[in-house]
Amino acid sequence: MKRLDLCGRQFDRLTVVGPSGYNRTKKKFVWECRCQCGTTVRVITNSLTRGNTRSCGCLERDVVIPKLRASRYDSTRHGHAARSGRSLTYASWMSMMSRCRNTQNPRWQDYGGRGITIDARWDDFMNFLDDMGPRPSKDHSIDRMDCDGHYTKSNCRWATRSQQQLNRRDRRKEA
């Protein structure tokens, strides 16, 4: 197999130091590269020549993520929708939105179908987070104190399942 000599060539933040072997599964030559930050990484030829790999990962940390955080619609700027998964608070907010606005949600009939609405301010997760604060634990979820009322700051709280069981429509009719 013919191999390009990439030694000494620069690919964005990476400089090719020398060959580092052959990847049998991908059937590609591998190059040892030194990043501008000082880290050494192994990269296959195509990833370098096509621009798929431009650094050891520091480019994303230094350039891409700060640009995303500056964006108004960045889901990571509030720290509640990280790559590793949604936070409990964000999951509660998404569930609330779906129950009230998504006719395909199995619980829509009990919420949006009954006319339960969400304060327009809460369309932005950051406003919801400011008003409600983070979800205290996995045992808490959003609760409407007046179960016929809407999702608003004055009508909502974080409550445990046992607290919510005492606040159900069918229980309130008995009292």
Image (cartoon, rainbow, N blue to C red):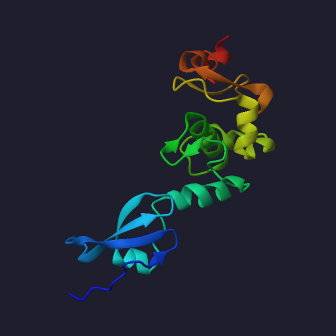
Q: Nearer the viewer, residue 127 or 166?
A: 127
Image quarter (top left, top right, bottom left or bottom right) of the C terminus: top right
Which residue appears farthest toward the bottom when viewing the image? 2
What residue is drawn where x is 37% and y is 62%? 41
Q: Nearer the viewer, residue 84 or 91?
A: 84
At which x and y percent is residue 5? Answer: 33, 84
At which x and y percent is residue 24? Answer: 19, 72
Depicted 74 relative to depicted 44: above or below: above
Mark count: 0
In the figure, is residue 162 to the left or right of 112?
A: left
Quadrant of residue 125 within the rendered picture: top right
What residue is drawn where x is 65% and y is 44%? 97
At which x and y percent is residue 167? Answer: 64, 18
Q: Nearer the viewer, residue 150 or 131?
A: 131
In the figure, is residue 93 to the left or right of 156?
A: left
Image quarter (top left, top right, bottom left or bottom right) of the N terminus: bottom left
Q: Is residue 164 visible?
A: yes
Depicted 153 relative to depicted 38: above or below: above
Quadrant of residue 152 within the rendered picture: top right
What residue is drawn where x is 52% and y is 23%? 139
Depicted 82 relative to depicted 150: above or below: below
At which x and y percent is residue 130? Answer: 75, 34
Q: Is residue 151 visible?
A: no
Q: Nearer the viewer, residue 12 or 76?
A: 12
